[in-house]
Amino acid sequence: MATAVHVQKGDIIDYTAAADVGYLEIVPLAAKIGIALEPIATGATGSLAITEVWELPAAAPLEIAAGDMVYWNKTNNNIDKTNSGVLAGFAVAAKTSAGTTVWVKID
């Protein structure tokens, strides 16, 4: 029988920065995003939150409904609904066309 070894809870992970990362900066990973919980210097390891609900930037005039799947647009550095970025999670509250942020459950 195979056994497992617990490594960490998983809501916060260790991340080694390829470039300097600022506190609360959004970090696109291969298949999701994380939020830096501390400044992380290039080559150093720090903590990224990869769960919970976060208020993230989103461009106007985009409308987002609660429950919409949303993505991190690495070019524009904001949330959109186009599946061409990195999956961020889903909106937990609606964003009107005039809004510039959206609440996202990242996971």
Image: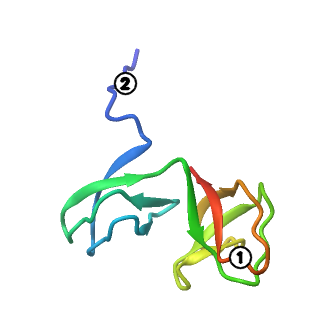
Residue 106 pos. (x, y %): 57, 54
Label 1 crowd bin: few (<14), some (14–19), many (20+), radius 10 Å: some
* Residue at image location 56% in from the left, 50% down from the top: 107
Q: What residue did someone put label 2 on?
A: 4
- Toward the viewer: 99 or 52? 99
From this view, report whether residue 51 is shown above or below residue 66. above
Q: Earlier in the sequence, mark 1 or mark 2?
A: 2
The N terminus - image quarter: top left
Q: How many marks?
A: 2
Nearer the observer: mark 1 or 2; the answer is 1
Task: Report the disc number at residue 85.
Answer: none
Label 2 crowd bin: few (<14), some (14–19), many (20+), radius 10 Å: few
Task: Report the disc number at residue 99.
Answer: 1
Residue type at mark 2: give it.
Ala
* Residue at image location 29% in from the left, 59% down from the top: 38
Give the side of residue 42 with respect to residue 61, left or right: left
Residue 93 pos. (x, y %): 74, 57
Residue type at mark 1: give it.
Gly
- Residue 22 figure quarter: bottom left
- Mark 2 lies on a secondary structure that is loop
Q: Residue furthest top?
A: 1
Residue 32 pos. (x, y %): 52, 59
From this view, report whether residue 64 is shown above or below residue 5. below
* Residue at image location 44% in from the left, 63% down from the top: 29
Give the side of residue 5 with respect to residue 11, left or right: left
Calculate the distance from the C-alpha at mark 1 to the C-alpha at mark 2.
45 Å
Give the side of residue 18 with respect to residue 35, left or right: left
* Residue at image location 58% in from the left, 62% down from the top: 55
State if disc 2 and disc 1 touch (CB < 8 Å). Answer: no
Which colour assignment does the render follow? rainbow
